[in-house]
Image (cartoon, coloured by chain):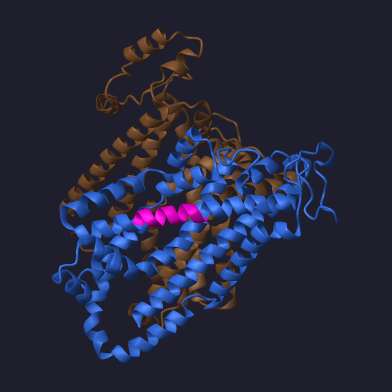
C-alpha cells in the first residue's frame, strides 16, 4: 500500500507540474504583457515598456514561469490588475460558496442515482427500467443551461414558486440560510450527474446480480431486502467512487454554467466575469486550481477504491 | 482495473462450463440494453431528420434572415410564422435551421479534427512504445486534467469567432480520448501475427501505421466519432450560451437560446423551448447512434 501510494503521489505530482506548464504557457500566449491594458490606451509606449519591465513581463517565458511557480509555492497566486486585488484573496472569497453548491448537488445526485440504478438493475428490461433509462438518456443529452432555463421558466415564471436568481448573500452557508433561493441551482446542477451516476450504478448492480454470492444468498433464503442492503448496495457502489473522482471537471464546468445562469456569486461567475474583463491572472489561477482538483479527484477516487476493495492488487 | 483482478480466479471453473457461459453471454448481450437494436434506428432517424430540416428545410421554407424588422419582433407562433419571431423580427423556424447548420457543421468538423489528431497521436505512441510512449501518454494525462471548458473559453475569447475557428479550437482540445483509444488498440494489434509478418518483411513505421494499425482500429474510432460530435455540439452550444460563440449576423443554437433567455420574464416561450429541444434531440441522436455502434462492435469482438 505504501509503495502504491508513493507511486500514485509521484505520478500525480508530475501531472500537476505538467498542468502548470501547459496552462501557464497557454495563458501567457493569450495575454501577452499586460502593460497596455493596465495603463490604458493613452499611456505612452515608454510608460508601457517601463511597466512591463518593472513587473518582469519582458523576461523570457521560462523565467516568468519559474518566478510564478516560486510565488505559487509561497501561496501567492498573482495579482489581478483589473480589480487591483490579490488573486488568492479573490478566489478565497468565492470558493466557499462554489464548494457548497457543488457538494450539495453531488450529494443530491448520489442520493437519487444510487437507489435509482439499483432499482433499475433489479427490474432489468421491465417497463420501469426502460422508462428510467429513456429518461436518463434524455437528461444526459440536455445541456445544463437548458435545464436551468427550463427550471426557471416553470418554477419562477409560470408557477412563481421559487426565485429565478440565486441568493446574493456573501456567506458560504447560504444553502442553509436561504434554501429557497438555492433549490433551483442545486437541482439543475445535480440533474446531469444523476443521469450519469444512475447509468453506472445500473450496470454495476447488474454485474453484481449475476455473481455467485448473490445466488448463494438467495439459495440460503436471505430476504431480498437484506441482499440489496448488505450485498448489492455496498459492492455495486464501488465503481461509483471512481466515477465521482473522475467527474471533478464536469462539476467545475457545471458550476460555471449554473452560476452564470442563476447569477450566483461563486468561482464560476468570477471566471466568466474575468473572461469578459480579460483578467488573465484570475483565469490562470482558477484554471490551475481546476487542474489540481481534477488530479486530486482521480487520486482520491483511486485510493478510496483501493482501501475499500481488498481484491485490488496494488502494483 | 477492478474487473481483471477477480475474473482471473473463475477462469478455471468457467472453462468447464465454456459452452454454457457462451450462451449466457449471448443472452446478456442481446438484453444488455433495454431497447435492444431500436436505439440505433431511433438515433439515425432523429439525426437524419434534423440534418434534413436544417440543410434542406430552407429550400422549402425560405425566410428572410438578413433584414431586421422591429415591427415584426416577438410575434407569437401563427400560420405565417409557425414558431413565431425573435427580437430582430426574424422567423424563429428559419433561424433554427440557420443555427442548426452552424451547430452541426462545427460539431462534425471539431470531431473530425479531434479524431485525426488523436488517431495519429495514439497510433504513433502505441507503435513507438517504451519511453516515447510513456512521455506522449503522460502529456495526454496532463491535458486530460486541464479543465476543457475553461481552456476553450479562454482561447475562444481571443479569436474572432467563426464556425471554422470554433471547430478548430474545440478539436484541438478534444483529441485526448481518441488518442487513448487508438493507442490501446494499437498496443494489442501490434502483437498480432499479420503485423509481425509485415514488420519482418521490412515494412516501415508509417506504412505499418497507415496500412495496418489505423485501418484495423477504425471500429473504435468510428464509435468514438459519434460521441465526439455530440460532445462538440454541446460544447459549442455552451460557448454560445455564455456569449463566446458565433457573433451576429451568424448564429448557433447556444447563442439563440441565450438571446431568448433575455425575454424569459416576458413569457416568449417560443424563443426558448424549440431551440433547446433541438439541442437535446441532436445530442440524443448522436449518443444513441454511438451507443448502438458500440454494442455492435462489442458483440462482434466477444463472439
Q: Is residue A240 visible?
A: yes
Determine the main secondary structure of the stretch shown in magenta.
helix
Q: In the picture shown, does residue B280 fall above or below A61?
A: below
Which picture quadrant has residue B73? Answer: top right
In the figure, B104 relative to A236: above or below? above
Say which quarter of the image contains residue B162.
top right
Side of A153 relative to A119 (left or right):
right
Q: Is residue A83 above or below residue A313?
A: above
Q: Residue at x 61, y 47 (%)?
A: B252
Q: Quadrant of the N terminus of chain A?
A: bottom left
**Magenta span includes A108:** no
Rendering coords of residue B302 (x, y %):
35, 79
**Residue drawn at 63 percent across, 44 percent down:** B251
The residue sitting at 40% across, 82% down in the picture is: A218
Q: Can you see residue B173?
A: no
Q: Position of residue B266 (x, y in %)?
A: 78, 41
| Relative to B190, B235 lies left or right | right
Q: Nearer the viewer, residue B36 or A31?
A: A31
Q: Nearer the viewer, residue A270 or A232?
A: A270
Vertical side of B212 occupied by A303: above or below: above
Chain coloured brown = A
Q: Tell me where the magenta segment starts and ends, as one range.
A: B108-118
Q: Position of residue A276 (x, y in %)?
A: 53, 29
Tell me, by letter, which chain the rendering colours blue.
Answer: B
Name the one closer to the observer, B262 or A102.
B262
Q: Position of residue B227 (x, y in %)?
A: 47, 61
**Quadrant (top left/top right/bottom left/bottom right) for the C terminus of chain A:** bottom left
Residue B117 falls within the magenta-colored stretch: yes
Residue at 41% over, 79% down: A222
Amino acid at each position: 500500500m505504501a509503495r502504491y501510494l508513493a507511486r500514485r503521489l509521484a505520478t500525480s505530482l508530475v501531472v500537476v507540474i505538467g498542468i502548470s506548464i501547459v496552462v501557464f504557457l497557454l495563458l501567457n500566449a493569450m495575454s501577452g504583457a499586460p502593460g497596455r491594458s493596465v495603463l490604458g490606451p493613452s499611456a505612452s509606449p515608454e510608460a508601457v515598456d517601463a511597466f512591463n519591465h518593472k513587473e518582469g513581463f519582458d523576461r523570457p517565458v521560462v523565467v516568468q514561469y519559474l518566478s510564478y511557480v516560486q510565488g505559487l509555492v509561497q501561496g501567492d497566486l498573482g495579482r489581478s490588475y483589473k480589480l487591483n486585488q490579490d488573486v488568492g484573496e479573490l478566489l478565497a472569497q468565492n470558493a466557499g460558496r462554489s464548494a457548497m453548491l457543488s457538494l450539495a448537488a453531488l450529494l443530491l445526485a448520489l442520493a437519487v442515482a444510487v437507489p435509482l440504478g439499483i432499482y433499475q438493475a433489479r427490474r432489468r428490461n421491465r417497463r420501469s427500467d426502460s422508462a428510467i433509462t429513456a429518461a436518463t438518456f434524455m437528461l444526459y443529452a440536455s445541456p445544463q443551461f437548458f435545464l436551468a432555463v427550463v427550471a426557471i421558466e416553470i418554477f419562477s415564471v409560470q408557477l412563481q414558486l421559487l426565485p429565478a436568481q440565486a441568493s446574493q448573500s456573501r456567506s458560504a452557508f447560504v444553502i442553509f440560510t436561504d434554501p429557497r433561493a438555492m433549490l433551483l441551482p442545486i437541482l439543475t446542477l445535480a440533474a446531469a450527474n444523476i443521469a450519469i451516476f444512475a447509468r453506472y450504478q445500473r450496470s454495476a448492480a447488474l454485474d453484481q446480480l449475476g455473481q455467485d454470492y448473490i445466488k448463494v444468498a438467495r439459495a440460503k433464503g436471505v430476504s431480498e431486502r437484506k441482499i440489496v442492503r448488505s450485498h448489492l448496495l455496498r459492492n455495486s457502489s464501488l465503481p461509483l467512487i471512481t466515477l465521482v473522482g473522475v467527474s471533478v471537471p464536469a462539476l467545475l464546468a457545471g458550476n460555471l454554467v449554473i452560476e452564470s445562469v442563476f447569477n450566483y456569486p461563486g468561482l464560476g461567475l468570477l471566471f466568466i466575469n474575468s473572461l469578459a474583463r480579460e483578467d488573465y491572472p484570475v483565469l490562470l489561477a482558477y484554471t490551475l486550481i481546476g487542474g489540481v482538483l481534477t488530479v486530486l479527484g482521480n487520486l482520491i477516487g483511486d485510493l478510496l477504491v483501493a482501501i475499500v476493495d481488498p481484491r485490488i492488487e496494488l502494483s | 482495473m477492478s474487473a481483471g483482478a477477480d475474473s482471473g480466479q473463475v477462469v478455471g471453473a468457467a472453462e468447464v462450463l465454456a459452452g454454457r457461459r457462451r450462451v449466457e453471454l449471448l443472452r446478456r448481450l442481446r438484453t444488455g440494453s433495454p431497447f435492444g437494436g431500436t436505439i440505433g434506428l431511433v438515433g439515425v432517424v432523429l439525426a437524419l431528420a434534423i440534418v434534413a430540416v436544417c440543410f434542406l428545410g430552407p429550400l422549402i421554407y425560405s425566410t428572410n434572415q438578413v433584414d431586421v424588422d422591429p415591427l415584426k419582433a416577438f410575434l407569437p407562433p401563427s400560420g405565417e410564422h409557425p414558431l413565431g419571431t425573435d427580437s430582430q423580427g426574424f422567423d424563429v423556424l428559419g433561424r433554427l435551421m440557420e443555427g442548426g447548420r452552424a451547430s452541426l457543421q462545427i460539431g462534425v468538423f471539431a470531431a473530425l479534427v479531434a479524431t485525426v489528431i488523436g488517431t495519429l497521436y495514439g497510433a504513433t505512441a502505441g507503435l513507438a512504445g517504451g519511453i516515447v510512449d510513456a512521455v506522449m501518454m503522460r502529456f495526454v494525462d496532463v491535458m486530460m486534467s486541464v479543465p476543457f471548458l475553461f481552456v476553450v473559453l479562454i482561447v475562444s475569447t481571443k479569436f474572432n469567432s467563426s464556425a471554422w475557428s470554433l471547430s478548430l479550437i474545440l478539436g484541438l482540445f478534444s483529441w485526448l480520448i481518441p488518442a487513448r483509444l487508438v493507442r490501446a488498440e494499437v498496443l494489442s494489434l501490434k502483437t498480432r501475427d499479420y503485423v509481425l509478418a509485415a514488420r519482418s518483411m521490412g515494412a516501415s513505421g508509417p506504412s505499418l501505421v497507415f496500412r495496418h494499425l489505423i485501418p484495423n482500429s477504425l471500429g473504435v474510432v468510428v464509435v468514438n466519432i459519434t460521441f465526439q460530435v455530440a460532445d462538440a455540439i454541446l460544447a459549442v452550444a455552451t460557448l454560445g450560451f455564455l456569449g463566446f460563440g458565433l457573433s451576429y449576423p451568424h448564429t448557433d443554437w447556444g447563442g439563440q437560446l441565450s438571446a431568448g433567455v433575455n425575454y424569459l420574464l416576458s413569457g416568449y416561450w417560443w424563443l426558448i423551448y424549440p431551440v433547446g429541444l433541438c439541442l437535446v434531440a441532436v445530442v440524443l441522436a448522436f449518443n444513441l447512434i454511438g451507443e448502438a455502434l458500440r454494442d455492435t462492435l462489442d458483440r462482434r469482438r466477444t463472439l
